[in-house]
């Protein structure tokens, strides 16, 4: 190892359970974490819950629970969902934890001592759902927040401000020096316009609240949710509690967040880092939203507050985590917006997984297990080739790496199918090894040798996306390289182990258990 990769997602409000829009973000981040590990990085993958909020305290009160007990139970429920989805997180921070409180108080004190925080009063339009003040431009003609469709309220209070406006020029210089800091490019343009046109000082405290983190230099106030929440990225790394560890891990290599909170992460957050004398993160990626396609064909945003959330556990229980992971990474462009529709979910799953990948696997394993249970004639020492397609092996791997590293997941999967699996299926149909094996077993064995190579390469490239399924495919054959050690480098090189075609998958009456059975969905 030696190369570090520090990756985070946005932390979530635990006022209700996660929905598939939230899961979209976590799956996308997990693909990156698994890919980086596969490439030899020492990954620190951080997730968590944003607990020091009014809405969380209010929800706990509605249920008659102590706030901390409520937060701990919701953290358990969130982690249960992420585990079921095979999210390979390394740490899960709750902002109610002592390590976060300690780090936050140390950070805000440092910024105050540096002269970047001052006391004043504020009056403006406040959205309770966002827990943020809004400008007139950010509200509709009814003075409603577009995200929550609830009226903003006029609010006035004494508070402490972070002097964000002082950092305009430093931020613009930072963006210029680090052109890849904000991704995709469309988000970068939005942030640049915001910083150039309207970078206002930020209210960072609330008064009269018991739940939250007390401001160390004036304990009548608690730290406002965004100034608190953003700090989870450094407090989990050890800021304020283990500075040696923090200095080893920081800066974060990648923040994966929703496009609606890009301005907080790309303007406020790097300015906060500058104010405290620490390096800003290296990259922020603002992914798109998942919209729910209704029976009328209308696409509506999935939202807890709008009451149309679909729970990931519903899909996992009915189908599988692999089905959910594949659909979102293949059908929904991670940098842009995607749609979830039950019928489309079934179509994509059945076409790509059950039919294309699943049938190829079943055919190859079944033919090998039934006809070549021991040595496979003519394959010893032979270097297999991928079935003929439009790209060379080197082109396939290079394209895959570039697309995954740029979080273009739907294109990476599309390329894998087009360059490896579709040609493999076409080659199988053309050569018909199920018929060839009856009249020319050695010729059929050579065809199967190449088809197994396609499955080997596909399983390696699917490892970050479908961890369970890809491992099952790989371990079905006697490949020489252990599954734990495979990387894209292994996919670049042909597998020529003498016993590679020995089938290790369990067969029943010469047939392999379906890799992923077809699914049917009633109209819903």
Image (cartoon, rainbow, N blue to C red):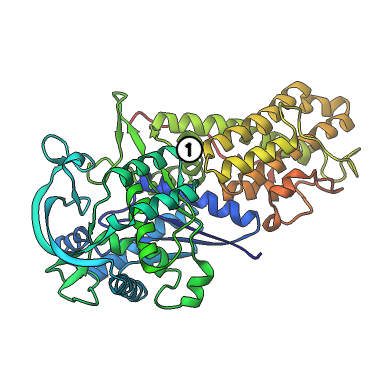
Q: Quadrant of residue 41?
A: bottom right
Q: Nearer the viewer, residue 141 or 87?
A: 141
In the picture, measured across the screen, residue 46 lies left or right of residue 419, that is left
Q: Quadrant of residue 197?
A: top left
In the picture, measured across the screen, residue 333 lies left or right of residue 511, that is left
Q: Position of residue 305 (x, y in %)?
A: 22, 45
In which quadrant will I find the C terminus?
top left
Looking at the rendered structure, the secondary structure element under dot 1 is helix
**Dot 1, how many residues are within 10 Å of its Cα: few (below 14), some (14-19), or many (20+)?**
many
Mark count: 1
Q: Nearer the viewer, residue 206 or 10?
A: 206
Q: Position of residue 4 (x, y in %)?
A: 58, 62
Q: Position of residue 259 (x, y in %)?
A: 36, 43
At x 74%, y 38%, the residue is 394
At x 41%, y 68%, the residue is 277
Give the labeled residue for mark 1. 327
At x 49%, y 55%, the residue is 282
Q: Quadrant of residue 483?
A: bottom right
Residue reaching furthest front?
Answer: 169
| Whether residue 509 can be seen here | no
């Amino acid at each position: 190892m030696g190369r570090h990769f520090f990756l985070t997602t946005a932390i979530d409000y635990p006022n209700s359970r996660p929905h598939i829009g939230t899961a979209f973000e976590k799956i996308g981040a997990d693909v990156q974490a698994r890919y980086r590990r596969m490439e030899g990085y020492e990954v620190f993958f951080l997730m968590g819950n944003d607990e020091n909020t009014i809405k969380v305290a209010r929800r706990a009160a509605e249920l008659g629970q102590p706030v901390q007990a409520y937060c701990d139970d919701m953290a358990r429920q969130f982690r249960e969902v992420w585990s079921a989805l095979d999210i390979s997180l390394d740490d899960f921070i709750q902002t109610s934890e002592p390590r976060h409180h300690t780090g936050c108080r140390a950070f805000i004190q440092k910024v105050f001592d540096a002269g970047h925080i001052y006391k004043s009063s504020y009056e403006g339009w406040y959205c309770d759902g966002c827990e943020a003040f809004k400008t007139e431009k950010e509200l509709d003609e009814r003075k409603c927040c577009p995200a929550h469709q609830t009226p903003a309220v006029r609010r006035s209070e004494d508070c402490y401000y972070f002097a964000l406006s002082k950092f305009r020029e430093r931020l613009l210089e930072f963006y210029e020096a680090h052109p890849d800091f904000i991704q995709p490019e469309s988000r970068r343009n939005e942030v640049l316009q915001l910083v150039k046109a309207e970078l206002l000082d930020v209210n960072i405290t609330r008064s009269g609240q018991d739940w939250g983190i007390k401001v160390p230099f004036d304990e009548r106030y608690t730290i406002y949710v965004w100034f608190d929440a953003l700090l989870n990225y450094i407090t989990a790394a050890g800021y304020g509690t283990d500075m040696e560890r923090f200095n080893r891990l920081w800066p974060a290599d990648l923040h994966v967040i929703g496009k609606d909170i890009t301005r907080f992460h790309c303007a406020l957050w790097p300015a906060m880092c500058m104010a405290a004398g620490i390096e800003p993160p290296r990259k922020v990626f603002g992914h798109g939203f998942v919209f729910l396609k209704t029976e009328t064909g209308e696409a509506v945003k999935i939202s807890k507050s709008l009451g149309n959330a679909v729970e990931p556990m519903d899909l996992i229980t009915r189908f599988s985590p692999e089905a959910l992971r594949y659909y979102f990474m293949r059908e929904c462009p991670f940098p842009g917006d995607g749609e979830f529709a039950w019928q489309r979910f079934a179509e994509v799953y059945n076409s790509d997984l059950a039919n294309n990948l699943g049938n190829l696997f079943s055919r190859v394993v079944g033919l090998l297990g039934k006809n070549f249970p021991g040595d496979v004639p003519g394959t010893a020492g032979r270097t297999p080739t991928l079935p003929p397609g439009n790209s060379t092996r080197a082109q396939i791997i290079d394209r895959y790496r570039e697309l995954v590293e740029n979080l273009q997941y739907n294109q990476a999967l599309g390329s894998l199918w087009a360059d490896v699996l579709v040609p493999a299926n076409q080659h199988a149909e053309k050569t018909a090894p199920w018929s060839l094996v009856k009249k020319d077993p050695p010729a059929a064995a050579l065809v199967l040798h190449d088809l197994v190579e396609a499955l080997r390469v596909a399983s390696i490239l699917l490892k970050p996306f479908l961890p369970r399924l890809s491992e099952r495919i790989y371990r079905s054959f006697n490949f020489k390289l252990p599954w734990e050690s495979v990387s894209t480098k292994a996919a670049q090189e042909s597998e020529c182990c003498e016993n590679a075609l020995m089938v290790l998958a369990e067969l029943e009456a010469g047939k392999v258990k379906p890799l992923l059975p077809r699914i049917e969905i009633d109209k819903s």
